[in-house]
Image (cartoon, coloured by chain):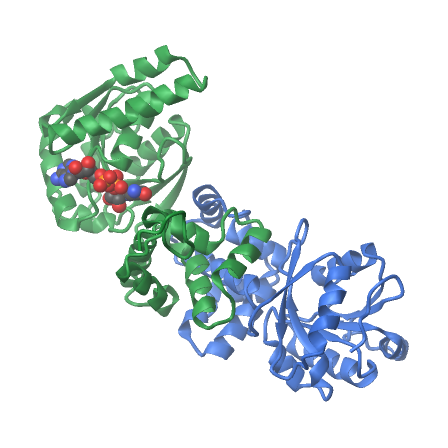
Chain colours: A green, B blue
Amino acid sequence: MERSSTAAHPHGADLSGSRIGVVGAGTMGAGIAQVAAWAGHEVVLYDIAQAFVERGGQAIAGFLRRGAEKGKYTLAEAEAALERLTPTTDVSAFAGCGLVVEAAPEDLTLKRELFEQLEGAVGEHAILATNTSTLSVAAIGAAMAHPERLCGMHFFNPAPLMPLVEVIEGPSTAPETVAAVYALALAWGKQPVMAKDTPGFIVNRVARPFYGEALRLVGEGAADVATIDRLAEDAGFPMGPFRLMDLIGIDVNYAAASSVFDGFFQDPRFRPHPIQRAMVESGRLGRKTKQGYYSYGESSK
Amino acid sequence: MSTPTGNETHVVILGDREHGLGEDLASLLRDAGMRTSMYDVGDESEHDHESRTDALTVADVAIDLYVRDRSRKANALRLIDSHLAADRPLLTCCHAGSATTAAAATKHSGRVTGFALLPPWTGRTTVECAKAMQTADTAREAVEAFWQAAGLDPVWVGDGAGLVLPRVVACLANEAAFAVMEGAATAEDVDRAMTLGTRYPRGPLAWANIIGLPDIVATMDGLAAEHGEDRYRVAPLLRRMAVAGRKWEL
Ligand SMILES: NC(=O)c1ccc[n+]([C@@H]2O[C@H](COP(=O)([O-])OP(=O)(O)OC[C@H]3O[C@@H](n4cnc5c(N)ncnc54)[C@H](O)[C@@H]3O)[C@@H](O)[C@H]2O)c1
């Protein structure tokens, strides 16, 4: 590995006080932008269309104002955080950013092109991070001139509330890059962990058997969904595997399972279950369709 | 089959003396007012043999609690089978193998049922129960009454190695061990990520420490034997740690 080019950002280690860029103003991007603005950073929030940036901005404003109404902080504090937020549809607005976090759709080609574009837009010391859940940092940075300044910064949904951030070190990532992002996550009140660039990183990989074995038990006819959930909840899991899949979205959970399975070259430990596919194909996706492993109110089916 | 409940119920547990499961179960049953004694078939003196046999002869219920040690489990099943009165229930711990396999090692197989109780038990209200293929229909009632008297709600599930929770949690702990072995993250970060990112009651490695690494290995080996699938292979690091008597440093 060529490490000499790592010197591209010798001062990159301290991001406190830096302007932060966020790419994509969807669920995760808006959440991350909110976290950064709340922590006192100037934040540039970018999306491809004005309507999308505005929607993201409104989501943040709504979230912060609700918190103020509940008395968690003052409305003035919420408004001050919102003041620090600059919406844009122009990547050149990232010019002065110390860090840009990408939270665009989970599509390798799209992310690759984005990072090439971002490299041209930011200064030479800027750090770039991706919030990808399932793609490899190595693959995303493959077309970059300086992949040593790219790492993963994997937040969990909802980003303002979930304390965990997986900081992902790709094969080309410089130690200074992960150190800076790790320190920043801590400064944002998060609880970061370090992980290597392997499929599913930590949580999306290690959690697989919770769903996979539960599905197999049902498939084998050993127990029904409600029984397994009851046993799991009795053992201290806040939600049994089926109630949890219904909440996450059976399609989302199935996509995560499939991606880790592919990432490990079809290692049977990660094989998804036919029940998952059948649920997705029949449109029973969990709470959002009112029908999953359980029924919720009026069924759409 | 007789229904053993109330204060005069005499329970004999055969299990690994070193293993936390035995004392935990014994105190659970004592708290429920049952006379409970525990023996380890590994104790070899003449006196040990005699007191075990005597206790089994008068017992109302006998429990085989072995998980990791197959030869002791076989030994315990044989002892219970020959000394416990034929109409009394034999409960076998299914953390590493099915009730059917255990029952097949006995002559009075109709009274054998399986159970699983994954540590830690504090606050637990349920116990997993499983009928072996050989279990007589009449056995179920007696076993239900016994667990209810112990303060646990029996939940019947299909027979198999690890039943439900020991199986699911062993697979989580095994996957966490693979992740550490492969350097995906440190043991400490794996457990921290899992508790923060999923709200599991504890990290899979901390849980493995409580259950005992050799028991996790035994559950995985039991699943591998039953299913014949690579899916259940034990992470080599986990197996080495279990053999070396190590725990995860978290
Ligand atoms: N939703 C989750 O629970 C979650 C959790 C962790 C990580 N992630 C990851 O975060 C990323 C974003 O996920 P999300 O759930 O926020 O998606 P989303 O669909 O809510 O948001 C994506 C946003 O990106 C915008 N976008 C589309 N094309 C773009 C482009 N070329 N450049 C910039 N922006 C573009 C979209 O308009 C949209 O606003 C994905 O990589 C996903 O895997 C999601």
Decide which of A255, A251 is in the foreground and name it: A251
The answer, for residue A210, to whether it is visible in the render is yes
Decide which of A4, A128 is in the foreground and name it: A128
Please give left or right for residue A290 compared with residue A281 in the image: right
Q: Where is A142 relative to A214, above or below?
A: above
Rendered residue at 71%/59% (across/down):
B20
Rendered residue at 49%/47% (across/down):
B191
Q: Where is B13 relative to A175, above or below?
A: below
Q: Position of residue A122 (x, y in %)?
A: 14, 29
Please give left or right for residue B220 compared with residue B57 in the image: left
Decide which of A38, A52 is in the foreground and name it: A52
Rendered residue at 71%/67% (across/down):
B144
Q: Hey, which quadrant is residue A185 in on the image?
A: top left
Please give left or right for residue A52 compared with residue A265 in the image: left
Q: Hey, which quadrant is residue B27 in on the image?
A: bottom right
Q: Quadrant of the C terminus of chain A?
A: bottom left
Q: Where is A224 relative to A120, above or below?
A: below
Q: Position of residue B234 (x, y in %)?
A: 48, 68
Q: Position of residue B44 (x, y in %)?
A: 82, 77
Q: Residue furthest top?
A: A76
Q: Hey, which quadrant is residue B197 in on the image?
A: top left
Decide which of A118, B157 is in the foreground and name it: B157
Q: Residue furthest bottom?
A: B107
Instruction: Tell me the quadrant of ligand 1.
Output: top left
